[in-house]
Image (cartoon, rainbow, N blue to C red):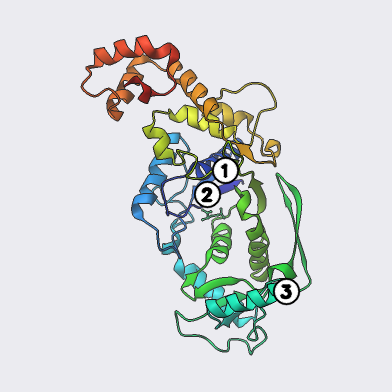
């Protein structure tokens, strides 16, 4: 059974990059008769905000990327918010500590920084060598809020995985070093929590952005230490701005909410996002979401960065606008207030006049 997920942290409005990751997970799951899960990663975030969480739900819904299991819909493997799952992490942290596979590291940030600088100056790999690594098992439990729990990375290992997009990827464990997995027994950090959640939610395929590649060997080591099976991995190419730098706030609209406000239609955005890193191998560019499900193929996703071309999005949006019934467009224009004070019949008249050259509904004004 294919089960995919996205696990956004509610630290901002749904970003187009996360939405594209959601779309690819959704398409892959639906193509294989599987399930798409939305999980909210809200542990260890100071900026986490329920308003952002609501925006993530709303924006995905608007795009037509419907999660089968989520905090809003529930499901068999809930709860779907990490902050409500703390009870599932603690016993596994205790297990690793008891088995001597993790340890309490008391060092402070400034100490670790100083060690890193010294190692780098000596031309050595900047991984922390903790004198507590081989201390007595379970020893030196620290008061909460002090130090962290570190994973004991086995030395001299090569960690290999077959990425479904990028092929074989290797990491040397000596370059990874002992990484932190929790602030304390009740505050797991990303790599630990995600490994447990993916396992408990029976995630078969982890499809996410390329920026997470270096987390994969850590998550694989944690799973191995706990005796858990490994999911399959696929890392999607970055989305680049026209200047070929990673797409960011600098490049105008970046959140789905902004695109919506600017008068883009969800069908156009979904179609456009699907082509950010994937193509069907033909010249065809216009696909409904159902057609995307039919044609999508993860093995055809490109490795190199996908350039975000706003002219193409504008062209597509115009095409989708012209395919819609005037009544439907009139309703959207009224809801979004693009022609304030216009009656429905004035709006329809304006639409008829402008339709042939319209790219975004917001241009009507
Ligand atoms: N919370 C992480 C993010 O939003 C999840 C990464 C993952 O998919 O494992 O980037």
Q: Quadrant of residue 356?
A: top left
Residue at position x 64%, y 70% in the image: 226
Is residue 16 among the parts visible in the rendering?
A: yes
Q: Residues within 10 Å of mark 1 (few under 14, many from 20)?
A: many
Q: Residues within 10 Å of mark 3 (few under 14, many from 20)?
A: some
91 vs 250: above or below: below
Mark 1 falls on what kind of element? Answer: helix
Question: Where's residue 137, x and y in %?
Answer: 62, 87
Query: Number of labelled discs?
Result: 3
Q: Is residue 211 left or right of residue 270?
A: right
Please tell me which of labels 2 and 3 falls first in the chain: 2
355 vs 361: above or below: above
Instruction: Report the residue marked by disc 1.
Output: 25
Q: Mark 2 and mark 1 in contact (Cβ < 8 Å)?
A: yes
Instruction: Report the residue marked by disc 2.
Output: 6
Of 308 and 32, which appears nearest the observer?
Answer: 308
* Of labels 3 and 1, the one closer to you: 3
> CA gap, disc 2 to disc 3?
29 Å
Mark 3 falls on what kind of element? Answer: loop
Of 110 and 176, which appears nearest the observer?
Answer: 110
Question: Where's residue 110, x and y in %?
Answer: 54, 78
Residue at position x 63%, y 49% in the image: 210
> CA gap, disc 3 to disc 1?
32 Å
Question: Where's residue 315, x and y in %?
Answer: 51, 22
Q: Is mark 2 within 8 Å of ligand 1?
A: yes
> CA gap, disc 1 to disc 2?
7 Å
Instruction: Report the residue marked by disc 3.
Output: 154
Question: Where's residue 325, x and y in %?
Answer: 38, 15
Of 229 and 170, which appears nearest the observer?
Answer: 170
Q: Quadrant of residue 160?
A: bottom right
Please tell me which of labels 1 and 2 falls first in the chain: 2
Looking at the rendered image, the quarter that the C terminus falls into is top left
């Amino acid at each position: 059974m294919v089960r995919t997920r996205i696990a956004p942290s509610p630290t901002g409005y749904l970003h187009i990059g996360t939405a594209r990751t959601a779309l690819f997970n959704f398409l892959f799951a639906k193509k294989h008769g599987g399930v798409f899960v939305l999980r909210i990663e809200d542990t260890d975030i100071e900026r986490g905000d329920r308003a952002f969480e609501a925006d993530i739900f709303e924006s995905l819904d608007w795009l037509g990327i419907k999660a089968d299991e989520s905090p809003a819909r529930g499901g068999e493997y809930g709860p779907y918010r990490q902050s409500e799952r703390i009870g599932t992490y603690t016993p596994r942290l205790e297990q690793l500590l008891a088995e001597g596979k993790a340890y309490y590291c008391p060092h402070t940030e400034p100490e670790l920084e100083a060690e890193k600088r010294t190692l780098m100056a000596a031309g050595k790999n900047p991984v922390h060598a903790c004198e507590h690594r081989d201390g007595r098992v379970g020893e030196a439990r620290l008061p909460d809020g002090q130090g962290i729990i570190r994973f004991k990375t086995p030395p001299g290992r090569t960690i290999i995985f077959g990425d479904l997009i990028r092929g074989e990827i290797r990491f040397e464990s000596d370059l990874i070093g002992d990484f932190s997995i929790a602030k304390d027994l009740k505050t797991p950090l990303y790599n630990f929590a995600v490994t447990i959640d993916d396992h408990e939610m029976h995630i078969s395929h982890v499809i996410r952005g390329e920026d997470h590649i270096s987390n994969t060997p850590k998550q694989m080591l944690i799973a191995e230490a706990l005796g858990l099976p490994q999911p399959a991995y696929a890392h999607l190419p970055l989305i680049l701005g026209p200047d070929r730098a990673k797409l960011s706030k600098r490049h105008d609209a970046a959140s789905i909410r902004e695109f919506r406000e600017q008068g883009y239609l969800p069908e156009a955005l979904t179609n456009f996002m699907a082509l950010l890193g994937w193509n069907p191998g033909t010249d065809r560019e216009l696909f409904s979401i159902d057609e995307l499900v039919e044609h999508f193929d993860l093995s055809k996703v490109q490795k190199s960065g996908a350039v975000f071309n706003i002219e193409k999005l504008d062209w597509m949006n115009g095409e989708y606008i012209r395919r819609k019934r005037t009544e439907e467009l009139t309703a959207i224009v009224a809801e979004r207030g693009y022609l304030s004070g216009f009656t429905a019949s004035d709006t329809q008249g304006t639409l008829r006049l402008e339709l042939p050259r319209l790219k975004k509904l917001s241009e009507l004004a």
